[in-house]
Image (cartoon, rainbow, N blue to C red):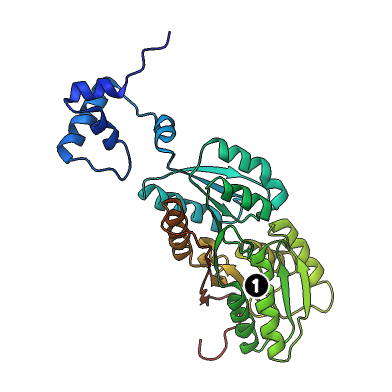
Amino acid sequence: MNPEKVTSQQVAKLAGVSQSAVSRVYTPGASASKKTMLKVHKAAETLGYRPNSLARAMVSGKSRIIGLIVAYLDNQFYPDAIEKLSNSLQANGYHVLIFMASKTAEGLDSVIEEIMDYQVDGIIAASVALSSSLAQRCSSMGVPIVLFNRAQQDDGFSSVTSDNVSGGAKAARFLMEGGHTKIGYIAAWEGASTQRDREFGFVAALQQAGLKLHAREVGQFEMEQASSATRRMFATDAPDAVFVANDHMAFAVMDTLRFELGLRIPEDVSVVGYDDVPAASWLAYNLTTVRQRANQMVQETVRILLDQVEGNGDQDQHIAIGSPLIVRGSARKPKGY
C-alpha cells in the first residue's frame, strides 16, 4: 500500500505560510525571504514533501530541463565538457537529461522525439549533426537548439566551436617551422565539421608555403581505426610528421609508431594532435596539440541557449573560439620554442 502523498498545502499549513510562498521557494529564480525559505524547508523535511517538478512545468509552461545529446564518450574531451555543461546549467537552476545518439542527422529523429516527451526547455547537441527539418520542427515547438563542437550554417540553431580552421593552420605552420617537408594527416569521421575545418586549415597553410600534403588516411575518431591508418601511412614512403584530427586518435597513432613500428617520437617522426585532453599532458604521451578552450565553449553555449530559452535572444549565433597551440615533446620544436 502506497503512503498518502504530501501536498504543498500541508507544507504551507505546517510552515504557517501561504501556498504561493511554498511555490516560490521551490521555483528557481522566484523570490522568497530567507525566513520563509527556512520555514518551508523545515516543514517539508518534517512531512517528507518533495515538489512535483513536472506538475510545476505544466502550470508554468517551463520544465527547467535541458536535453543534452552526445554521440560518444570515448574521447576524453566529451566527458569533461559534459560535466562542465551540466554544472553550469545546474548553477543557473536547470536540470540536465543526457541522451546518446548516433553521429548522423538520420539517427537523431527518435532521440529528439524522446527528448520532447520530457518537455525540455532547450537542447544542446554535442558532436552530432542536425537536419534542417529537425531544427525547424524544434523551432516550431519553441525549443531552441545550440550545437556544441559542431558547426552548421543552416537556419534554426546556433553553434559554438573552437576556430578549427585557424587551429589546423597553426599545426601546419609549427611542423613546417620545425623543418618537416613530408607531412601526413590522419582524418576523423568525414561527416564532422570539426574534421572538415581542421583539415581545410591545415592543408591551406601547407599550400601557402608551397607544400603538398604528403599522405592522408582516415581514423574515424576511433583508436583502432587510427592504428590501422598509421600502419597504412607508414608502409611505404613514410612521412616525417603527422597531424592527427584529435588527441584520442593521436594516442593510438603514437602507440602504433613506437611499439609496433619501432619509431622514435619526435626523433624519427613528429606527432601533433587537437583538443588538449588531460592525457595529452601525461608523460607517456607529452603530446603537442591544439587546445580547445572547453571552459569558454561551455560558457558561450550556456549563454546563448539560456538567452533563447528565457526570451532574451532569438538570433542564431555561430561562435568560433580561438585555439592556442600547446607545445610539449611529441614534435620537433622550431627555434625559439
User: Does 139 appear above or below 270?
Assistant: above
Residue type for callout 1:
Arg
Q: Which of the two residues, 138 or 304, is positioned nearer the viewer here?
A: 138
Residue at 20% in and 21% down: 13
Above or below: residue 332 compared with residue 252: below
Element at badge 1?
helix
Expressed as whole percent of the image width and height from the top left, the position of residue 175 reads 64, 83
Is residue 29 among the parts visible in the rendering?
Answer: yes
Name the foreground residue: 279 vs 268.
Answer: 279
Q: Which residue is mark 1?
A: 198
Report crowding for label 1: few under 14, some 14 to 19, many 20 or more residues within 10 A (C-alpha): many
The percent coordinates of residue 307 (x first, y second) are: 42, 57
Residue 91 appears left or right of 72:
left
Q: State the residue at coordinates (51%, 67%).
A: 281
Indicate the quadrant where residue 41 lies. top left
Q: Residue at x 65, y 87 (%)?
A: 176
Res. 131 in view = no
Instruction: Answer left or right for 116 relative to 190.
Output: left
In x, y percent, where is residue 149?
A: 57, 61
Q: Relative to the observer, which residue lies in front, 261 or 86?
A: 86
Using the rendered view, name the quadrant where residue 268 is placed: bottom right
Q: In this rendering, is residue 266 above or below 222?
A: below
Spot occupied by residue 223 in the image (x, y as percentages of width and height): 69, 58
Residue at coordinates 21% horizontally, 28% vertically from top-left? Answer: 18
Identify which residue, 75 or 88, lies in the foreground. 88
Q: From what the image shows, is residue 278 above or below residue 200? A: above
Quadrant of the frame with the N terminus:
top left
